[in-house]
Amino acid sequence: MSNIKATELGTQSIRQLLVKYALPGIIAMTASSLYNIVDSIFIGHGCGAMALSGLTVAKPFMDICAAFGSLVGVGASTMVAIKLGEKDYESANKVLGNVIVLNILLSSLVMIIGLAFLNPILYAFGASDVDIVYAREYMQIILYGNILTHIYFGLNSVLRSMGHPRSSMAATIVAVFVNVILDPIFIFKFDMGVRGAALATIISQAIAVIWQMMIFCNPKEIIHFHRGIWRLDAAITRRALAIGTSPFLMNLAHCFVVVIINNCLMFYGGDMAKASFGIINRITFVFAMIVMGLNQGMQPIVGYNYGAKQYRRMWRAMYLTSICATFVMGGVFLLGEMVPDLMVKMFTHDTQLVSLTILPTRILACSMLLVGFQMVTVNFFTSIGMAGKSIFLSLTRQVLYLIPLALILPNFFVSNPILGVWWALPISDTISAITAAIMLMVVHPKLK
């Protein structure tokens, strides 16, 4: 990345920068979320309702594996953006080398532990004797390819922060395109079931990693692979892990919450209730990924201007992103309240599952207008290195609010306790959004 490309983050119009940096992320995240929907559609129609239930059980475990990747990737990308703002290019290059080494070490550890204790973990995550077969087959393949997954997400984060949002987008689109092509081939033609879906995911990520490596091997890039960057630097490692702790704990807490919800749903409604939760998650996931794309675009802008002490530009980027995120999540609200049946029928033709999912979809959609703002606020604190505040906000919604509500509210719905589990989600979203607003009001006068 040239100096001109780096310094545009501190001089160009915030609106133009947000479009330039967020649009590729939005396209990439939308493509990625559409892949997840297509993947679920193939599994639902090709393997049945219990396969969807098994995938719902496997999802938090897969997210935990990815959380260790975000522990390194998000921290490193934030450091790259800040170092570029400070014109410290040597340190930015060392961050790149540390990303690769740390991801290899962490992903290998996760793979070994995950494979060794796979069945107990899946049962703890809410699996039954029926759907654990599907969950186990899926996760075995995912764990074997865990190293590729970590490197893929880590390098994509660095690409965005060094001024290559389009290259990051291209890597994601390549992975999604290959995945969607391979899914029906492996699931239907080769009759591999959920194993085929997992294998398609890993192969697509391997191809994306090759694409990323070609970019970082170019010596003309200001941040690229070369000798002297591969040794772990204690200061860089500590700082990257400290910053990355917030999204890591957010992902970890989210997975833990999904486990609690899965077990509550299993207790009150059985496997079909878990399948309902999986479908609703995939509907909201599309819009949440668009917000994540906005966050990806905001991160280098906020990080650079924070490093350059241009706080007015930093706040403007945060405000514009929050407005856009609220507008995006409004789509979930409208679709969930007005046409929930059409959303659900995309995933299954099982009439019982469709009827069980419509009301929960409406319940969960009612708080979606607030979710985008909360997501942006968490990412904002991460982008300026305020890991403690970001961690606190991450944990309030997932742990402090949602888990107690999910365990307590069913007691107030005596005739239909499962409604208490469903209502716990929008209530916790509302309280956490209020908490985020208060924290921003406290921090704003200090960063004028």
Image (spheres, rainbow, N blue to C red):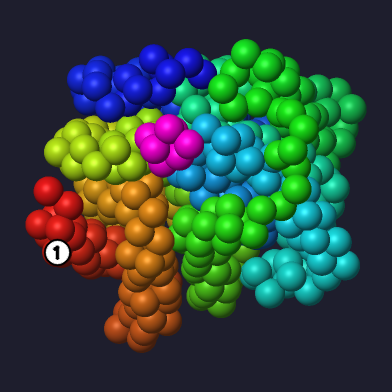
- Identify the amino acid type marked 1: Val
Q: Quadrant of residue 42?
A: top right
Query: Does the magenta segment cover residue 225?
Result: no
Asked if residue 86 lies in the magenta stretch, the reply is yes
- Residue numbers of the magenta segment: 82-88
Q: Position of residue 391 (x, y in %)?
A: 40, 65
Judge left or right: residue 360 versus residue 127: left
Q: Can you tell which quarter of the image residue 92 is in? A: top right
Measured as percent of width and height from the top left, residue 91 is found at 56, 41
Where 99 sits versus 395, above or below?
above
For numbered disc 1, what is the local secondary structure?
helix
Q: Which residue is mark 1?
A: 442
Residue 181 shown left or right of residue 86 in the figure: right
For image coordinates 62% across by 22% down, the residue present is 171
Q: Is residue 167 left or right of residue 356?
A: right
Q: Is residue 40 above or below residue 386?
A: above
